[in-house]
């Protein structure tokens, strides 16, 4: 699979049913995804497989994700938003 095709699939997966998630994911993919390590990119892609209600709860601070890698990715994305 080509790099461009892969990135297009990731962009598509970032389009969620909740605006709150869209405004987190889309800029992150455009501005930061390419600078992540391959492992971090894989974790981000795994994060995109989570259900919207779980993602919403994690990003809004209502719950903490029990998966350590996913939780670190949530923190990374939130830290970029706060800067």
Image (cartoon, rainbow, N blue to C red):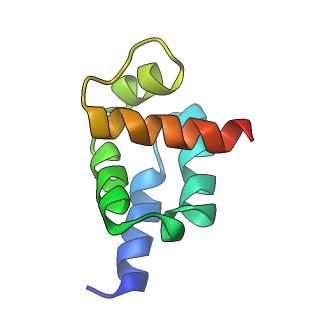
Instruction: Residue at 27% x, 49% y: name it.
Output: 46
Name the quarter where the C terminus is drawn: top right
Name the quarter where the N terminus is drawn: bottom left
- 69 left or right of 18 in image: left
Residue 50 shows up from this direction: no
- 50 left or right of 25 in image: left
Tell me where residue 69 appears, x and y as whole percent: 30, 40
- 58 left or right of 25 in image: left
Tell me where residue 57 appears, x and y as whole percent: 43, 19
Tell me where residue 72 appears, x and y as whole percent: 40, 37
Tell me where residue 6 appears, x and y as whole percent: 35, 75
Q: Is residue 43 above or below residue 51?
A: below
Furthest toward the right, the residue is 83
> Splitting the image into 4 quarters, where does residue 71 fall?
top left
Instruction: Residue at 67% x, 40% y: name it.
Output: 81
Instruction: Residue at 40% x, 14% y: name it.
Output: 63
Instruction: Residue at 26% x, 23% y: name it.
Output: 66
Instruction: Depth check: give the residue in front, 19 or 60.
Output: 60
Furthest toward the bottom, the residue is 2
Q: Is residue 33 above or below residue 15?
A: below
Instruction: Depth check: give the residue in front, 67 or 48.
Output: 67
Q: How many marks?
A: 0
Residue 71 shows up from this direction: yes
């Amino acid at each position: 699979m080509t790099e461009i095709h892969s990135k297009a699939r990731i962009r598509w997966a970032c389009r969620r049913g909740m605006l709150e998630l869209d405004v987190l994911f889309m800029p992150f993919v455009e501005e930061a995804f390419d600078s992540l390590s391959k492992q971090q990119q894989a974790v981000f892609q795994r994060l995109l497989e989570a259900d919207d209600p779980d993602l919403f709860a994690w990003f809004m601070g209502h719950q903490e994700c029990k998966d350590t890698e996913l939780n670190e990715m949530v923190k990374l994305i939130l830290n970029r938003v706060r800067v």
